Amino acid sequence: MMFHNMIFAWFLILSLLMALSSSSLFFLWICLEVNIMSFIPLMHSKNLMNMNSTMMYFLIQSTASSIFILSVSLYWMNPLMIQYLEILIMISMLIKLGVAPFHIWFPQISEGITFSSLGILLTVQKVIPLYIMMSFKSKSIILFIILSSITGSMGGFNQFSIRKILAFSSISHLAWILSLLMINSNFWLIYLSIYSIITFMIIIMIKTNNINTFNFNKKINNEINLMLIILLLSLGGMPPMIGFVMKWIALKIISNYYIALMIPLILSSLINLFFYLRLSYNSFLKHMIFNKWNPSFNYKMISMILPQILMIFSMITFI
């Protein structure tokens, strides 16, 4: 089983590299299909909920791919229709990404797959669709940016499932990435990279410690509590952490083109940060019991190194 997963993971990485080195729409479509066919076996397990999520993901991605290749074929037949077909191509990529209002499937699938698959879905699977959208830079996506910023913040407001919170957070961050794409800024690659690192660190932590929900009654190791708080607040954009720095730079870039677009982005970030702070307090800080006379050290404390380095780096950058 491990050998099979390694093969599919290799094809997944190969599809990304091939897509990033190509400018042909038809070849990009092939890379998309290889990417999907490589990811689905990594998602699959014998769990019924997981099987339903895998099937739903396949249907959604297949539908979006069909729209994409149909649009490309029509463009080859009649290049004069490029303005209309460009919108169809963008919509097909927005469906693949789970951007609002095409996001209904995204939280449901996130709830039914393993944490390893969730990490790939939230990060790696965004690369090829975003790369394709970079070739068009259509201003028509501004409505989807606003909807995603609102949906991502409000959708996760009353959630306690970690998977759904990360899913709605992903939708919110997509609004920022699409804003940078729309104004032709290459900073979206740095933004996506930092977001991916923070997200993977959170997923590694919750997978290692078997945390599925923010359970008020569950006492977790104090060091783990602290690290999760740091990572969540960084993901929400709490100054002076690295998550704040990347949003601050993004705002500086966006302000040169669309000042009005900054309003929904800032408001959504404030809402996200509010419920991250609330969850951090209710789920972790209330149950943290420090005993300076009985210090304990175990292997889990080693995993605190990366968040601490991340925080120190962000502070230096902020200063």
Image: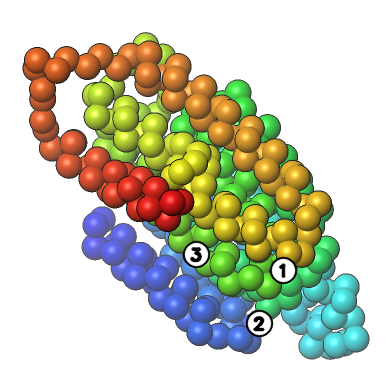
**Between marks 2 and 1, how big is the CA–CA gap?**
21 Å
Q: Amino acid at mark 1?
A: Ile
* Residue in the image at 52% along x and 59% along y: 191
* Of callouts 2 and 1, the N-terminal one: 2
- Reading the image, the residue beneath label 3 is 190
Comparing 61 with 303, the one in front is: 303
* Of callouts 3 and 1, the N-terminal one: 1
Specify few, some or many for label 2: CA neighbours under 10 Å numbering under 14, 14-19, or 20 or more.
some
**Between marks 3 and 1, how big is the CA–CA gap?**
15 Å
Residue 168, numbered label: none
In the image: residue 117, left or right of residue 290: right
The chosen color scheme is: rainbow
Comparing 293 with 189, the one in front is: 293
- Reading the image, the residue beneath label 2 is 25
Quadrant location, the N terminus: bottom left
Residue 276 image offset from top left, x and y in percent: 51, 30
Labels 2, 3: front one: 3
- Reading the image, the residue beneath label 1 is 183
Residue 87 image offset from top left, x and y in percent: 82, 68
* Residue in the image at 31% along x and 44% along y: 307
**Mark 2–mark 1 CB contact (< 8 Å):** no
Residue 84 image offset from top left, x and y in percent: 88, 73
